[in-house]
Amino acid sequence: SNAAVAVIARRSGEGDQRGIRRTAWQSLLLVTLLSLVFGLAGVFGSDFMVGDAAGAKGAVRALASSYLAVLLGGCFSIFFLLQITAILRAVGDSRSPAVLLAGGNLLNLVLAVLFVYGTGPYPTSFAWVAPLAEWLHVPRLGVVGAAWATVLARTIAVIAGFVILLGRRGGPKFHVMYLRPRRQELMQLLRIGWPASSQLVVRIVTVLVFISLITRFFTSPHDNSALAAYGICLRLEVMAMFVGMGLGAAASTFVGVN
């Protein structure tokens, strides 16, 4: 998505509409292939990743494996959501991505409560969802319900994003010829994008090493409090990091266009 912003913003500054469309759809073709790879890895390898690689034990391993299988199996939703919002930013629309991401997260919250608790019982603060769950006959899914909620909310946001993207004046209109793989475009996206991806991969691998150490030496099948504490702190840190990444994404659009 960083590579798509860089290339499309430059094409936008040049007034190259055909270049915008070609790069946009080639980038979406690329993330389609990536989502298939990660999706298959999640569906067939989630237990290995959670248990053998990360060292999760007991009920945590079972819960995390089912959660990860759904989340990675539906990873196309986050791949497309990030890519569509990146394309919209690159052509000068910063409001629609904000609405899509904020709306998707709010929908995720409501669906998570609905799917996690189903027909109940509910904590007092979430009791307002109970009538909706009973009306829809939603079963109580527990942890895996949160994964289904995330995938569904992101998918709805992706559909809305495609509608905005295709309806935008001067945006990347669809034509089947743009989906034909073009080696030059794909290699350009990979060449520009891999350094940013590598930085994030190194960061996440470091986090996974810490998680593995904590799960192997500081948890037991009956006590995962150390891992829960680390997870809470990690989420708060990532929230702060995303603020900086958002400002960086905005800057990259301006630099590319100019």
Image: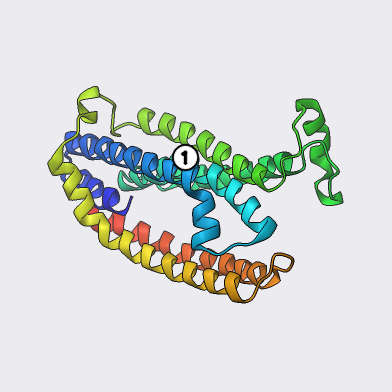
Q: Is residue 50 left or right of residue 12?
A: right
Residue 155 in the image, given as x and y percentages of width and height: 51, 35
Q: Nearer the viewer, residue 101 or 194?
A: 194
Q: What residue is at 82 percent from the left and 30 percent from the top?
A: 134
Q: What residue is at 31 percent from the left and 47 percent from the top?
A: 90
Residue 257 seen in this snapshot = no
Identify the residue at the far left of this view.
184
Instruction: Say above or below: 97 vs 221.
Output: above
Identify the residue at the far top of this view.
176
Q: Is residue 145 left or right of residue 98?
A: right
Numbered disc total: 1
Residue designated by label 1: 77
Q: Is residue 26 left or right of residue 41?
A: left
Quarter of the image where the C terminus is located: bottom left
Q: What residue is at 49 percent from the left and 62 percent from the top?
A: 53
How is colour applied across the structure in the image?
rainbow
| Secondary structure found at label 1 | helix
Q: Nearer the viewer, residue 193 or 73?
A: 73
Q: Nearer the viewer, residue 43 or 97?
A: 43
Q: Quadrant of residue 147?
A: top right
Residue 109 in the image, given as x and y percentages of width and height: 66, 46
Q: Residues within 10 Å of mark 1 (few under 14, many from 20)?
A: many
Residue 112 in the image, given as x and y percentages of width and height: 67, 44
Instruction: Say above or below: 207 vs 4.
Output: below
Residue 176 in the image, given as x and y percentages of width and height: 24, 23
Q: What residue is at 41 percent from the left and 62 percent from the top?
A: 245
Instruction: Say above or below: 1 vs 137.
Output: below
Residue 18 seen in this snapshot = yes
Q: Amino acid at mark 1?
A: Ser
